[in-house]
Amino acid sequence: MLKPVLQRLVPLALVCLSAVAAQGEPQAGGPVAAANTQLRASSDATAQRALLDRYCVTCHNQKLRIGGLALDTIDVTNVGQGADVWEKVVRKLRGGAMPPVGRPRPDKVTYEGLVSWIEHALDNAAAARPNPGRSPSFHRLNRAEYHNAVRDLLGLDVDVASVLPPDDSSYGFDNIGDVLGVTPALLEGYLEAARRVSQDAVGDTTISPETYTYRVAPDLTQDYRLEGLPFGTRGGTLVQHNFPVDGEYVISVQLLRSFIGGIMGLADKHELEFTLDGERLQLFTVGGKKPRGGGDGDEGNQAAPPRKSAVPEDAGLKVRVAVKAGTRGVGAAFLQRSSAQLEDLRPPYLRSYAVLSDFANGQPAIASLAINGPFGATPRETPSRRRIYVCRPERPSQEAACARKIFSTLARLAYRRPVTDADVQPLLAFYENGRKAGGFDTGIEKGLQRLLVSPAFLVRIEEDPARLAPDAVYPISDLELASRLSFFLWSSIPDDELLAAAEQGRLRKPAVLQQHVQRMLADARSRALVANFAGQWLYLRNIPTARPDTQIFPDFDDNLRQAFRRETELLFETIVHEDRSALDLLGARYTFVNERLARHYGLPNIYGSHFRRIPLSDDSVRGGLLGQGSILTVTSYPDRTSPVQRGKWILENILGSGPPPPPPDVPALEEKAPDGKVLSMRERMDQHRANPVCATCHARMDPVGLSLENFDAVGRWRDRGESNTAIDATGTLPDGASFNGPRELRAALLEHPAIFVNTLTEKLLTYAVGRGLEYYDAPTVRAIVREASGTGYRFSTLVAGIVNSPAFQMRAKGK
């Protein structure tokens, strides 16, 4: 019944945008003298024209148009008129990329003077005619935002990844409005998600038992205690599972099997502990029933598969337990035994558990944990029910009024605005149908299901005022500002405090807005910036799929993979919550490690699976993004490093000047010279650059990427490369600055901090407004960076600059 409603309402939301009238006609921009919009001929303009003619026009003229750019005819007295071209010029000049290395260029003072003059002219023109761009009118919530919105609306942590397809990305992020379309598969997913969420939130005691299986990464080393599990245990898994109602649930475990299907490591007895919220549920004993050297069911013959008739040893690893509704931590882990036997087989971290588990004398490991239920469900108060039931009808005659109050309260938060009778009536219609079928709770469940597929919930809609001319610039409403702010900092809906300020028309006041920004950054929900902004900008979402070659890197396992990601997340999280300088991302003299990561980095005296902050010496190769295993691994191939990928990553994410896409059919790197000599990585890259098609881009990428060659493909320090030759880590930045190795690269980048902060601000603004940046956004970015420089580039200053910018608070009307 809901599917036709959703199919009708989603397109209708688009149609209705043009019919909604605004209350009043806001004024655009502050007054700026009209004369400031153009820079007429002057001695300065004449001097800059001479510089362009001397150093740029040789290549960038109407005849050659190298790079698609002609500067011989451009009007230097009216920079604002050709702002799109001038912004391209500024980007190349500010990055030191032009004139190319080897070509004549002016002295540093003259060079900086030219860049500053162009930027000043562009900024003056932008101040005279603000152009905030046009964010999409129809901005669907992405999967992460949907998850967080349900959590904050209903107090329910649900796994939406199992029902909603992944979102498309653009400009590096999956919250870009233009690519967040609505497909039939997505509609089906929304319907299923709404059904599950409404049942779990209301606590439907008639729901049928379901099984949720949590699989453990096969290359997770389970020899040591894992974070979150009880002390004195090793391996296992810990999951956060939502139990929808009070009832009995069956928790079971399957042990890791060899490639022929036998459970390995059961020659000796092992004790397996099940826990719920850290408390022991049951202790099982497995193994010790067969001769050493045998797997489960193979009578001691390791090569033989288990007998078909044999009952697997893990068949009885299950417990039925009464659980109260809510999100609970369910764990399973082995009690720690003496590791002497295992240490005889291998030194710590020399071989991943996934490989060792194929040997009979290893230790057993957990492959998956399953939760099945509920059985004998009973109603009970839960955090979700307390949020939903703002009233309790004592008599049937009170039910309709109570239902209206419930849905009015929920819809206000879900729709992110005051609601009208027209908003509530469709919900009440579904409530009535459900009530007739199963009573008051069933009615609330059906009405909630309808709310969760409403376009007003699933889509952020920004409406153009009716009486404005096309392309006119206007401030968005306080309610729209509240939504932009909450989805920027929390990837979720506004809370009651933020929404109330918007409803009262107070949110736009600078002091009020700043107060909310500070409050929201301090809130735990701001961790969405780490998961969703940093996770995509820094490629952290790619880490789970990183698969280094186990023949070359036998010690790489899922423990290390998780540690890589957590180190980078903790760095970014610390910068946000402690309001540290954004430059810590490049040059932090501290990092975060656990024992596993510290061993990998060669840092002594770090024990235990928990992460802790440690200081780093000034000459440490760690500290900052460029010394972290996460970045170094996701920019490598499974079997070797990639100076190209590493150089490209730095150009795009640090310097803000990424190369164009590579041409098709790029030849692979040659590993040997014609005479059979094994080539070093630098020699292979030199040979590749000899191809004229490849030379231009690689001349910028390779020297930067090669400076990180002392880090292997999983981020370990080394002095010799894959060809066993001494590593040459010298390199140059696009502006010609030279360095040797990661320490000097880091220092060279920090000599021009505004370049990196400019790149970070561009990424953050793109994420905040949900669209790609255009040339007219560059003055906004420069203004934010200049303001932040006075505070040492503190993170909160960058956020405040974005929130107060025209791009965030204003919008251009569509045609």
Image: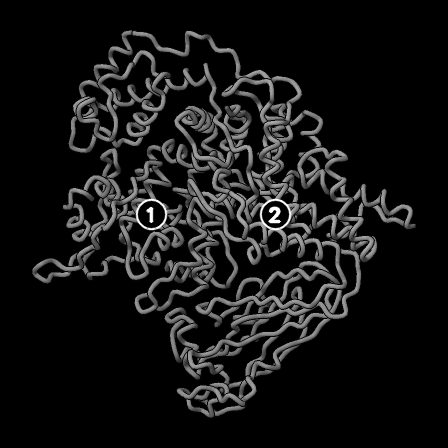
Relative image position of residue 629 (x, y in whole percent): 38, 54
Q: Is residue 3 among the parts visible in the rendering?
A: yes
Relative image position of residue 572 (x, y in whole percent): 48, 45
Relative image position of residue 577 (x, y in whole percent): 55, 42
Residue at point 85% right, 45% down? 400
Label 2 CA crowd tier, 10 Å (few <14, some 14–19, many 20+): many
Residue 589 located left or right of residue 316: left
Disc 2 is placed on an element classified as: helix
Residue 815 located left or right of residue 105: right
Disc 1 is placed on an element classified as: loop
Measure the alpha-carbon separation of dots 1 and 2: 41 Å
Label 1 CA crowd tier, 10 Å (few <14, some 14–19, many 20+): few
In the image, which disc is placed on residue 152? none
Say whether disc 1 or disc 2 marks the residue closer to the N-terminus: 2
| Circle 1 residue | 619
| Circle 2 residue | 148
Q: Is residue 554 above or below residue 604?
A: below
Which of the 4 image quarters holds residue 701? Answer: top left
- The residue closer to the viewer here, 737 or 551, is 551
Residue at point 78% right, 51% down? 433
Residue 295 located left or right of residue 324: left
